Structure formats: structure tokens, C-alpha cells
Image (spheres, rainbow, N blue to C red):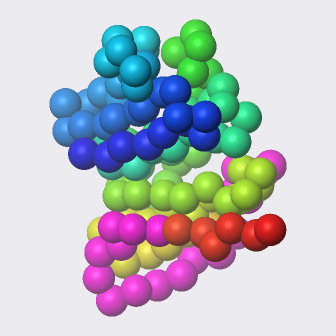
Amino acid sequence: MAFGFLSDGRSLISGSVDTTARIRDVKTGELQHILNHKDGVGGLAFASDGKTVVTASGNEIIFWDAVSDRQLRTIFAAQPVNNFALSDRDRFLVSGSSSGTADVWNLDSGQSIQSLHHQGDIWGIAFARTT
């Protein structure tokens, strides 16, 4: 299971092995949206615009319109994605897999621009924030 908050703290998104990501109002707990996937949801985040949700499910990194629940684009990874992180201003995304590979994606092109290798599964990724 994975969790994330919208930067203003009003919405919470949770992902599960039940193949859904659910967006809820933090104050009321009211379910606002359900995003359906083919596989369990291993990673998720709100993009910096506050209107786009990004989820990882199986080999797919999916960008969603958080208002309409419409898929905006999908990036296909070579290995199932366990988790990911978005850079400041959402220019890059790094995904981690059980194969020990962390892929750096250029989000303008949707292409992997570098692969970094570890000895085991990659479950956590973070970018250092710049000021």
C-alpha cells in the first residue's frame, strides 16, 4: 500500500493491491475518485500542479487527470515498478524495481535517460528538494 497528500493537505491518495488508487477528502474522509488499474498500485503521487495524479502499477507509470479520472499518458517500464519519485517541477521521474534497477525518466520526452543499478529490490526513492 502507498499514500500521498496533495501539497495543500486537502486530499489524500492511497493505492492498494486491490488494483485501485482512491482519492479522499482529508477532513471528511469522503471518497472523491477511484482510479482503476490492471495490477496493484505500488507508488503514487500528486504532481506539482495539484491536478495530476501519477501512479505505478505493474510496468506502467500512469498520469491521470485528478478531476475527470481520465488517463493522460502512460510510460511503460521494462520491469514492474515498486515505487517512484517526481523531481521539483515534475521534469524527471525516477522509478525503482525488484530487478535492482532505478530508471531516470525525462518527462518531456517520456524516455528513460539513465539506468542505475543496485544489488537488490528498490522500494524507496526520493529527490533532494532545492531552494
Q: Is the magenta stretch mostly helix, strand or loop?
A: loop
As drawn, which residue projects farthest toward the front? 27
Toward the left, the furthest residue is 18
Count how many numbered circles sit on residues in the image: 0
Instruction: Specify whether 81 is left or right of 38.
Output: right
> Which residue is at 42% across, 14% downward?
33
Residue at 68% from the left image edge and 60% from the top image edge: 87
Residue pictured at 48% horizontal, 58% vertical: 84
Q: Which residue is drawn at 72% across and 50% down?
A: 90
Q: Is residue 123 magenta?
A: yes
Q: Most extreme residue toward the bottom, as rendered?
A: 119
**Rendered position, 66 above or below 120:** above
Q: Nearer the viewer, residue 14 or 83?
A: 14
Q: Can residue 99 be seen in this view?
A: no
Residue 25 position within the rendered picture, expressed as x and y whole percent measured from the top left: 42, 19
Q: In this view, does 36 lie above or below 113?
A: above
Q: What stretch is highlighted in magenta?
A: 106-125
Quadrant where the C terminus sits is bottom right
6 vs 23, left or right, is right
116 is within the stretch colored magenta: yes
Q: Can residue 120 be seen in this view?
A: yes
Front-lying residue, 94 or 101: 94
Q: In which quarter of the image is residue 19?
A: top left
State which quarter of the image contains the N terminus: top left
Pinpoint residue 78: horizontal percent, then vertical percent: 46, 59
In the rendered image, residue 98, in percent from the top left (x then y), is placed at 30, 69
Q: In this view, does 110 lie above or below 95?
A: above
52 and 80: which is toward the camera: 52
In this rendering, the answer to whether 102 lies above or below 85 is: below
Q: Which quarter of the picture shows residue 122?
A: bottom left
